[in-house]
Amino acid sequence: MPDLPAQPRHLPPARMKKPKNMVAASLHPSPSSPALPAHWEFAPKLPKLTLPPFPSTTEESGSMTNTKFDVTSLMHMLSALPTGDLDSISEALPRTATSWSSEMEVIFGPSDLKCDVLTDVESGYRSGHFPSGRSDAAKERRAIKGFQKETEKKVKEASANTVTFETFSLTNALNSDTHLGAPQITEPLQTWDDDISRIALHLNTMFMALGRVVKLSAGGGADCKGRNVALSYVWRKGELAGVFKIVTGWHAIGHPNDPSILSSDMTQTSSQFSACATLLQELSITSRRINSLIKEVDPSYYSQLEALQSQVLKKYAFAKALKAIDPLLMEGRAIMFNRKTPRHLNHADPPGSWAILFVTGVFTVGYLFIPQLNLRLQYRPGDVVMLRGRELAHEVEAWVGGQRISVAHFTHQSIWDEHGLRLCVLPAP
């Protein structure tokens, strides 16, 4: 056995217990190690060089054992790199890639793939952006949180631009029998046609799909001499005209004490009910937006709507079933196609209740007029208006352009009476 080198100083003497947590790294064999083969030689130390990570090859596929590293090949590759600064290297990279592709083709032959590389749109996501894997419920919660923040921002913006009308008092309107008599107007005519606090709602496609499969009413019903007068509708080729009511707590005119039911428009035929259910499901996110708007503008009103809906769900199984696809707190929607709604008050609403109106379609110019305030509001696709429709008379003027669809969200006094509730209107702060 050849003479071994002396014990390094950093190792403890023989037969001495090594301290705990001490790591003794050495390339020299210890006296207890077996004898090394005669042909074993230690290679000289290489100059200190930090090499970049480089893929290694193995003798067995999928195994990390028996790793070989070909230094000669590495040096050959390094010598092929251009010298100079980073700019020269970046300029040479395309040429290096082309050369590499040519060498691979010589080794493996031409590629048999004849398809083009997918673009970002074709592949469905950009490079490095993979599907999140979130569930549908998680995506919905994320969307709701997003537009709640958006609604809060819009309401704060509207509050910062508050306008006071000296000629109208909500308190007086609630304590008097409001009618459509000519108001005493002293306010100068105002027209709001800016883009402040707008929420874009592109919904005309789904409403048109409903309107083509259901029977629209135009000029009939108990309101045939009021809002639903036949002359209020604009009839044009390729466009729809009429009204369709989706109400989940309906009382027929003259029967306020009967149990509430679904509106007849929903249940007239099985195909109409199916179309209504499809629309309610598609409107789910929009309905949550409406709820969020109510909560931001009038938290007390929002809480009272929640209490009312809780009573309805306890009493009616059909309401509980529809709640699974329709989160709207209000029970009523009136969908109006191409209607110039004449001046009217929402007499069926509870005193002080809100009506939420939004409009969509392909027209370009339109206005909503509130005569008691002598105010014209821009009413174009995507605009949302929230007003107390029982106290403020309002009308929809003629518009410029094509198909116009407006949706009124409401709650009626009859359903509050059925469940023994009374809407409490808090004074404005």
Image: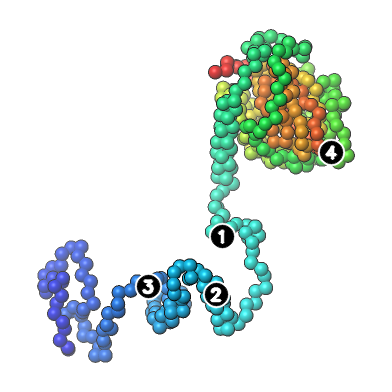
Residue 378's spot in the image, x, y percent? 71, 29
Q: As rendered, which of 216 and 248 lies closer to the eye?
A: 216
Q: CA distance from mark 3 to mark 4?
A: 72 Å
Q: Are marks 3 and 2 in contact (CB under 8 Å)?
A: no
- At 75% from the left edge and 42% from the top edge, which residue is drawn? 205
Q: Could you tell me which secondary element the residue under label 3 belongs to? A: loop
Marks 3 and 2: which is nearer the front? 2
In the rendered image, the quadrant that contains the C terminus is: top right
Residue at the spot x=68%, y=24% of the render?
Answer: 355
User: Of the numbered discs in the image, which one, if any, rests on residue 127?
Assistant: 1
What residue does disc 3 label?
51
Three-letter code for the amino acid on which mark 4 is drawn: Glu
Classify residue 104 by image quadrant.
Answer: bottom right
Mark nearest the camera among 1 and 2 is: 2
Q: CA distance from mark 1 to mark 4?
A: 43 Å
Badge 3 amino acid:
Leu
**Residue ID at (59%, 25%):** 161
Q: CA distance from mark 3 to mark 1?
A: 29 Å
Mark 4 vs mark 2: which is more N-terminal?
2
| Residue assigned mark 4 | 239
Say which residue label 2 marks.
Answer: 95
Q: Residues within 10 Å of mark 3 (few under 14, many from 20)?
A: few
Labels 3 and 2: the sequence-earlier one: 3
